[in-house]
Amino acid sequence: MKKTTLMTGFLILALIQAIYAGPRFDSVSLDPIYIEAGDTVNVYVKFHENPDMRDVLSAGSRGEGGGAKTIAGDDPSVFYKVRLIPADDISETYILVKEGERSVGHLFIGESWTSPFEIKIRENAPATTYNMEFQIIETDIDGVEEELIIGNDVEILVRDSVEFDIDSDNALEVGSTEDIGIGITNEGGGIARHVNVELTLDSPFTTATSSSKYLGNFEAGETKDVEFSVSVGSDAEIKTHKIPLTITYVNSDGVSHTVNREIGARIKAEPDISIGLDEADSFAPGRKGTVTIGMANEGFVDAKFLKFKLLPSEYYQILSIGEIYIGNLDSDDVETEDIVIKVNDNAPAGEILLRVELRYKGDGSNKDYVLSREVPLKVLTPGEYAAEHPQQDGISTALMAVVAVPALILGVLLLWLIYKIIGLIMTKLNKKLFSKI
């Protein structure tokens, strides 16, 4: 009776051991543990080769150095491979597995193996639990024959994510104080609490008010606009400058996060050229003279490849070269050009307009600028002109000629008479001096 009971116990134990012999799933771990949409996650699955009853009885048999070796119950012809695959349609849609199958090879009795898998959560993945299946497949040495031994569920919890999209397109003038506008959208599925936005300003920018703004909470899909008043230095380089932007917030689980981005701020500037009449001769219909046109660059940047041109008009003719290449007109510099013109007979008295055109490029820019201005020129009536310039009137000139000729003759006669008188006086003086000797 005792022998029968003992025998029955051994049979039951052997049966249990036989049932539990083979590979056994141990655990799964995720890195990171907190997972949001868009994250890359490492999945570590651990399993081992479970011994049967004969292995237990032979547990003391080890190879040199304590390493595992083929022992009773170990089948050297058995090899394993593992797979991690989506278990349903939603997981297949939003979970990407980099390498879904790995070869394990042969496991000795009691030996464990950790299989790493890298998965990618899509950016638009909704917050939910995604089901994956970890499979252990028995195969031969060539990997041809396959038999599914274990299929174990692996759950991937994707939490509500906060994903900020930044929209900023700003162009600021050199030497100005302007607002930098930024649009911030929470494109994730989670709420962002206590959102704070801060700009890190460096030369050529300085803050005109505050470089930090508190925006409160952002619901999923919500957009808020924020502005920062910024001063731009007068020596700012004409280009797009990068400004660091920091967003801090607390997610729905109370975890603080920091997002670092950059926004671009384009610095723009154009030469600011003023044109005016610097000097001019007096003009009347039919009269010619010289006009001096002045150009001053009052902007912060230089004007490059400057060309000056006086355009023709129905009221004047250009008698000298009317198109002149100047070159560079530096900031806070002045240039003048002299042009000889003749006012036409049909020009109205009072004022006519000189049509001036400038062509140039901005400093640091290949953009062509064309500046057209009309410069007023005073035109006298013939009477006003004659009063200002009597020597140039034809009648006055003739009268002067009539008066000048007799005056010249009289002047010559007077000089001759004086010469004769002086000669007579000198002769008498000489006679008296010599007579006394």
Image (cartoon, grey):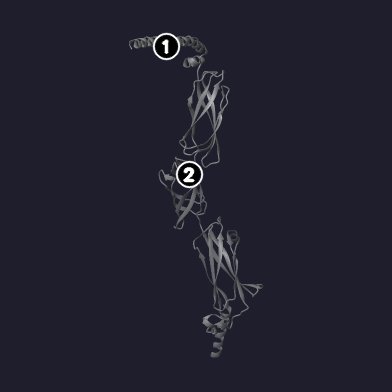
Coordinates of residue 383 in the picture (x, y in percent): 50, 14
Which residue is most to the left?
A: 436
Task: Give the labeled residue for mark 2.
Answer: 237
Q: How many marks?
A: 2
Identity, as a three-letter code, of the amino acid under mark 2: Glu
Q: In this orientation, does residue 216 appear? A: yes
Q: Secondary structure at mark 1?
A: helix
Q: Residue at x 56, y 82 (%)?
A: 55
Coordinates of residue 130 in the picture (x, y in percent): 56, 62
On screen, residue 294 above or below 158? above
Q: Where's the C terminus, which quadrant? A: top left
Q: In this orientation, does residue 12 appear? A: no
Which residue is most to the right?
A: 144
Q: Residue at x 56, y 26 (%)?
A: 320
Coordinates of residue 100 in the picture (x, y in percent): 60, 65
Please tell me the numbered disc located at residue 419: 1
Look at discs 1 and 2 and give the one toward the viewer: 1
Identity, as a three-letter code, of the amino acid under mark 1: Tyr
Q: Where's the N terminus, which quadrant? A: bottom right
Mark 1 or mark 2: whose residue is earlier in sequence: 2
Q: Secondary structure at mark 2?
A: loop
Please tell me the numbered disc located at residue 138: none
Quote the CA–CA distance across marks 1 and 2: 81 Å
Q: Nearer the viewer, residue 413 or 277?
A: 413
Q: Nearer the viewer, residue 272 or 184?
A: 272
| Mark 2 Cα shell of 10 Å, populated few (<14), some (14-19), many (≥20) | some
On screen, residue 409 above or below 268? above
Q: Residue at x 37, y 11 (%)?
A: 430
On screen, residue 232 above or below 50? above
